[in-house]
Amino acid sequence: MRASGRGGGRTLYDARVNHVVLVPVKAFADAKARLATVLSPGEREALARWTAERVLAAAGELPVYIACDSEAVAEWATAHGATVLWHPGVGLNAAVNRSVADLRRQGVDHVVVAHGDLPRAAALAAVVIPGALTLVPDARGDGTNVIALPLHLLFEFEYGPGSFRRHLQRAVASGLPVAVRRDPMLAIDIDTPSDLTHPLVQEVLPAWLPTNRGNPTRLPR
């Protein structure tokens, strides 16, 4: 079975595995526009690929699904053994909500939704709490970097500024069992130039990135 009309590295659902990871990934060429003051277009695209690959690695043995509307991202996902959920032109929130609905229809029990720009992502399976919605806020307590949702619960994802408080309030108002996990590694994302200077980010930045103080080599502009 192919996922939403697109090929992928796995079938949409393997009955032996009921937890999966879903990563929404923006077109690499359009990613990280707020870093334009410190990185070239080529560097921003390479950084977006690098962080997304780290998130995929953090899935461990769990099947990975990529929500996207970019041919380049779809090809990248397939090459990395992930399944593509193709929802073109609908924006982040609709793409995630539709992808979660796709997985629910196929019998997946629990989905971990992780953004693709988490440089210190690790052990995403550990976020799962059986029967409960888990929210992992970013370091500012503003965005929601990871959400783990048991799919017998109905919940609408609504990212954007203030999404952590919005998601938490929505869960409480709906009477859903909810847990907040404040994880210092999963809380780190890369949105602004200052994020690149975070000590935990500096530890892992690739050698070619100019903002890595220990590795100042630049990609050609």
Image (tube, rainbow, N blue to C red):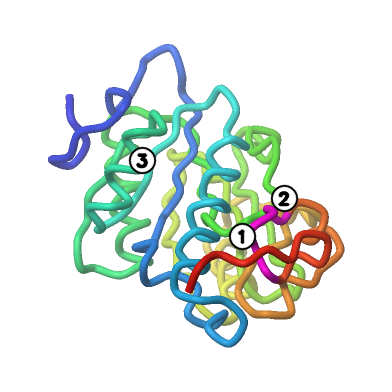
Assess disc 1: are there few (<14), some (14-19) or many (≥20) residues with their C-alpha within 10 Å of its C-alpha. Answer: many
Residue 98, image x, y percentages:
28, 53
The residue sitting at 72% across, 71% down in the picture is 211
| Residue 139: quarter of image | bottom right
Please give the label number shown on residue 145.
1
Task: Give amino acid for label 3.
Answer: Ala
Kindly identify which residue carries mark 3. Answer: 77
Of 197 and 25, nearer the camera is 197
**Are the residues tagged 1 and 3 within 8 Å (C-beta)?**
no
Q: Position of residue 14 (x, y in %)?
A: 36, 18
* Element at label 2: loop
Q: Of helix, strand and loop, which mostly describes the magenta segment?
A: loop
The alpha-carbon separation of the residues under discs 2 and 3 comes to: 20 Å
Mark before the other along the chain sequence, 2 or 1: 2
- How far apart marks 2 and 1 lie (CA) works out to 12 Å
Q: Quadrant of the N terminus?
A: top left
Type of the residue with mark 2? Arg
Who's the residue at 83% across and 61% down the image? Answer: 214
The disc label shown at residue 120, or none: 2
Real-space Cα distance between discs 1 and 3?
Answer: 20 Å
Q: Is residue 177 above or below residue 215?
A: above
Q: Which residues are magenta?
A: 205-210
